[in-house]
Image (spheres, rainbow, N blue to C red):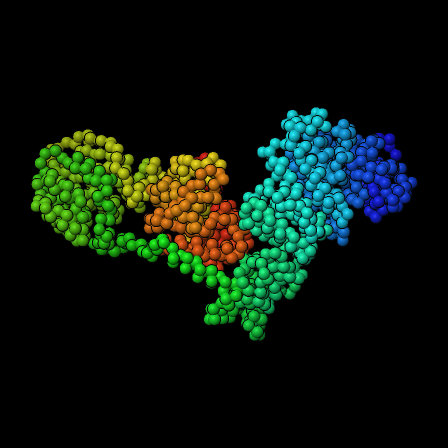
Amino acid sequence: MADNPLVSIVVPAHNAEVTLARALDCLLDQEMVDWEAIVIDDGSTDATAAIVAGYVEHDARFRTLSSSAYSAAGARNSGISTARGRWLMFLDADDWVDASFLAKMLAALKTAPDAVAAYCGSRRVMPDGELTPPSIPTEVAIQPFETFARRCAIRTHALLVDRKTIVELGGFDVSLRTCEDWDLWQRLSRLGKRWVMVDEPLAFCRTSPNSLTRNSTQMLADAEIVIARGFSPDPRVKQPASAHANGAIEANGGTASEALAWFALWNAASDCGRGRRSISPQTLRALPAGRKWAREIAKVVLDGLMVGSLSAPAQMAARWDRFGGSLTELIAELGKVWGDPVAGRRVQYHLEEVLLDLDDLAAPRRLARTLGISVDIRNPISIELPEGIDRIYAYLMMDGRIEAVVQFGVLGTVTRDHWIELIQNVVAAERLVDSAARFAGRSPVPEQPAGADMSNTLAAEALSATAERGPDPDSHFGKLAQLGAQARELVRSSAEPAAPPAAPRRARPRHDKDRTSFWNGYFATEDPWNYGSSYEQEKYERQLEILPAGPIGRALELACAEGHFTRQLAPRVGHLTATDISAVAIGRARARCSDRPNVEFGVLDFCADTLPGEMDLIVCSEVLYYLDDLAELRRIAKKIVEALAPGGSFINAHAFVLRDNVERTGFDWNTFGAQAISETLAATEGLVLDQSIQTELYRIDRFRRLSPGDVATEPTIDHAPIRARLEIGVARNIVWGGARALRRDVARSERRQRLPVLMYHSVSDEGPAALARFRLTPAAFHSQMAWLRANGFHAIGSEQLEGFIANRQPFVGRPVLITFDDGFQNFADHAWPTLRANDLTAEVFLVTGLVGASAQWDADSGPPTQLMDAGTVRRLAAEGAFFGSHLATHRAIDGLSSSDLAAELLRSRMFIERWTGRPTTAFAAPFSVTDRRLGRLAKQCGYRIGFGGRHGPAGLDCDPIDLPRIEIRGDRSLDDFVAKVEAVLEER
């Protein structure tokens, strides 16, 4: 035996005759042989001493010591005092390690010469030999002290540590009956030195009924001491790292009280595993109740249960009767301690889901809220729900094979018809062909044509029978119908008035009709262009400003429409002939100008009809865009020249259009605009430009017909600002600063499989700092919408998205679905005007039970933000906004009972339909939290489109009831927004 072995292995043993040989044999199996084992017989009265003597006799690497410490800590300290190795390992007499343990641990330490310890993963071994899943705490390698200040993350024998350092630290604290290893690792990590991880479960820990880890009272008392030490200076550590000298930092992982509560939870769960309770729920008060912690709490509970019940996870559902009652009581009391029963139910659901995920469902598993069963899809039978059950977890089986795993919320008996409907929705049609006849009790189904949909064949009998007789009132669908009736009565009795059904939009006139019909179609509604707006009136004023000096005898107005400008022009001329192609428009114009005796009206198609001649002035504005092409414009320009008297003036006002120049501000119309019109008129023989008033949006030109001998002079060009407020009908067609892509161009050239669904919350300059992520400033939102508009995007609604997916029809151009969660008033104040101004729309998901109130779910972060009221919802819906459900109370759905979830889905949908007068088919899950019940229950409540917690673009291959979105954060730049959207564009 070497005098200075590389590793010293300290093995305390007290009455360990049953397990000791297995522990010592694993040392003999080690691939690395340079070790010594010091076995400390700590007052054993059984055959332990004889067993040790046998190993000492046959292998000189074994040594033995006697001790009367009657504690693992004292016995280990005795071993440390005689150890000679560079590294120490502590192996309890009932545990063992893999044969490669020493070799792999030493190899890891060799790669990190500055490391003070190496550790690996571990697995528990139950009395029946079942192994638990591996546990490998990666956080120890990242921040060892902050981890050990809060919990003992590593099994005692899953570690190699530097012997000299352990000696300097004083070894194990013998005043602790439990947690003594945790205390030592905490002191060791306080030095701030490196720990290296071997990412394999090489250590095995036997769990037995007599283990000290099952003494929850002692464990909790000792843990309180260790945690308190971790959050304060420890004089036992002479040279701590400066960062750890004063203890753990709360910001790095929680407070001392939280750490103790987590440990108390583990022990409480362990007690439940033994079917008893010894820990007060009040010790759990410091546990975080937030939904993001539910899975972690369930994980800790599961780990405690394993030790207490002596069961591997795969055995727990089958053994639920042993501990389920006490565990359910614990979780319910945890919800009461938090003051949030929903949070407790969320933990219960998560835990039961984990247990059933691991179970084989060889027999029905009745847990507290979930029933786990296997169903023969060839012969499904009705299942009556045991009391308290509102969720089914089922294997759909055929020929001993699992065809599908389903989990769904239930309100009552799951009938045979219900099972058939579910099966035909989730099991592949080809697998059901041979089974279809079994449902109906007939001979095998005849072969179907290729591609035939067998789902209807399978469910037809069941669904038609249900429709004929109505659902059983005790069945799931019967209970759902009752909830629906209650929701309808609640909505009916609401004080909020119902919106009338949304009127179908009037179709715009089509160009393929004759011109007269086309324009009469426009004037079917009076004042189709809002001639009285300040924007139109400002243009009228500037046209009057540009009139030629001196008296104007005979004037002709082409396309006078309803006579708004006619009335203002008449006092400035001797005689005015006002014409329009539409007799409807002329009728209104004549009535408007009935007190203007110098005006005569007539129906005239200036494209086809002869124009009256010898005019001193012709005015023709905002209509030349509608000509078929520039060739027709050139022809009309010649007609105008011919109708003017020599020296007569032609005035026209037209807007700049992107088709003429995509790089400057203009209207996104599919026609030529002011630039092309002005250039064409300037090129017309006999016409010269005298004066032009130009704004960013339009230009007003006065041309003159040259008289014989006239010489053209330089025109006067005046630039004027636009002071008038732009009505939405105007603003939505403008792309400021020019466009990088036009909608019509990308619609012709681009087809794609995916599109961005953008998720917003709040648009405001002010709000709690803690919610900055969810809040964009109005300026930032404006920049994003302007970018979408300038890059050829058009907005769609969720129903359109669902249609594309249902038909597998590629998206045309550059569609975007813009969504807002919560329904804040600042959507109406800031976001909606910006959206409309950029010819975009959005879908807002409303919390219907809080409409008109405030976002109380954010109260912990600061003053709650005001929510839109029903009147605002009605107004915005009439203006083109879409609305969907964010449920009724903004509670995360994974903590709602199935009955409460269904009730919220139903009443929120019905309220929105009452306010908007339109069907509501879309929902977004509050907090983006979903579970496996939501999609199916939402469909049964009338929804077709859903948005949950998935992130990314939505594609044609997505499930429309569980669509992903892209969160747009308020603490990110415009460049970040652009990068996210362009990444979707690049996918095509």
Q: Residue at x 28, y 42 (%)?
A: 727
Q: Where does the image place residue 733, in percent across and percent down from the top left?
A: 31, 43
Image quadrant in which the N terminus is located: top right
Taking depth in this image into account, of 482 and 219 the one nearest to the observer is 219
Estimate the x, y position of residue 112 in percent, counting from the top left: 71, 31
Q: Residue at x 78, y 44 (%)?
A: 95
In this rendering, position of residue 665 left or right of residue 581: right
464 left or right of 541 in image: right
Q: Is residue 309 left or right of residue 870?
A: right
Total numbered badges shown on the rendered structure: 0
Residue 528 position (above or below residue 246): below
Identify the residue at horizontal 75%, vertical 47% (top origin). Answer: 207
Q: Is residue 714 left or right of residue 880?
A: left
956 and 479: which is toward the camera: 479
Residue 283: image x %, image y %? Answer: 63, 42
* Res 651 visible: yes
Q: Nearer the viewer, residue 568 or 267?
A: 267
